[in-house]
Image (spheres, rainbow, N blue to C red):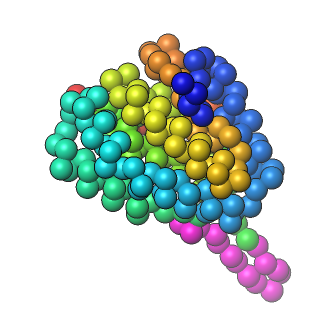
Amino acid sequence: MYEPGVFENVNEAIDAAYEAQIILMRDYKTGDRDRFIAKIKEKFLAIIDEETIKEFNETGYGRLDQKLKKNYESIATCQDTSCLRTEVMASSEGLTVEYSAPYGLAGALTPVTNGIATVACNAMTMIAAGNSIIFNCHPAAKLAGAKAVSLVNEAVLEAGGPANLAVMTRNPTTDSLNAMMTSPKVTLLIGTGSEA
């Protein structure tokens, strides 16, 4: 079964997301990123209860009633590019505008407990900031992670954006995590979770 953004090989996933970020910054504007994020939210919120139940059954972690609420609220309230700060300074010498540049390709480690919401929200915030992202999902939640990565890509493509802004390896392992963390193409690492 084809799942957009889900790769058999971690290095192919890294390369695809790296190229997608270059395309995002070269060919798309901030308003486009907002359109992609709105479509991601729309797609996730339409199926969030069903996918949360599947994730709960896959992992066996958490309390279903709390997961349903948390996943919905996290995705519904995730911000778009309006959260990006711009500083404007004016003086008799002229005008200066400062804004943050994207990092490029972010690598993310996701927890077993909140894979769907973590993938959705990390992808939306990275896209808002002009980045792409590769996930190394927890192996016990890899099906939920793959579904979430696929939904992100379907939404972005439907909204007219580039493929592979969010990617993952189908079978995440310690080796795929190490490849992600040591790749020179991955310029930012994100870890979600806590101590055992």
Residue 50 is drawn in which quadrant?
top left
Q: Position of residue 12 (x, y in %)?
A: 66, 22
- Which SS does the magenta portion mostly show? strand
Residue placed at 46% from the left, 40% from the top?
A: 148
Q: Position of residue 117 (x, y in %)?
A: 38, 46
Residue 39 is drawn in which quadrant?
bottom right
Q: Position of residue 127 (x, y in %)?
A: 60, 51
The mark tally for this picture is 0
Residue furthest bottom as drawn: 92
Q: Which residues are drawn in magenta?
A: 82-96
Quadrant (top left, top right, bottom left, bottom right) of the C terminus: top left
Residue 180 shows in this picture: no
Residue furthest top as drawn: 175
Residue furthest front as drawn: 1
Residue placed at 38% from the left, 22% from the top?
A: 139
Residue placed at 80% from the left, 52% from the top?
A: 27
Towards the viewer: 51 or 141 = 51
Quadrant (top left, top right, bottom left, bottom right) of the N terminus: top right
Residue 89 in magenta stretch? yes
| Relative horizontal placement of residue 43, taking residue 133 as reference (left or right) | left
Residue placed at 44% from the left, 59% from the top?
A: 78
Residue 76 shows in this picture: yes
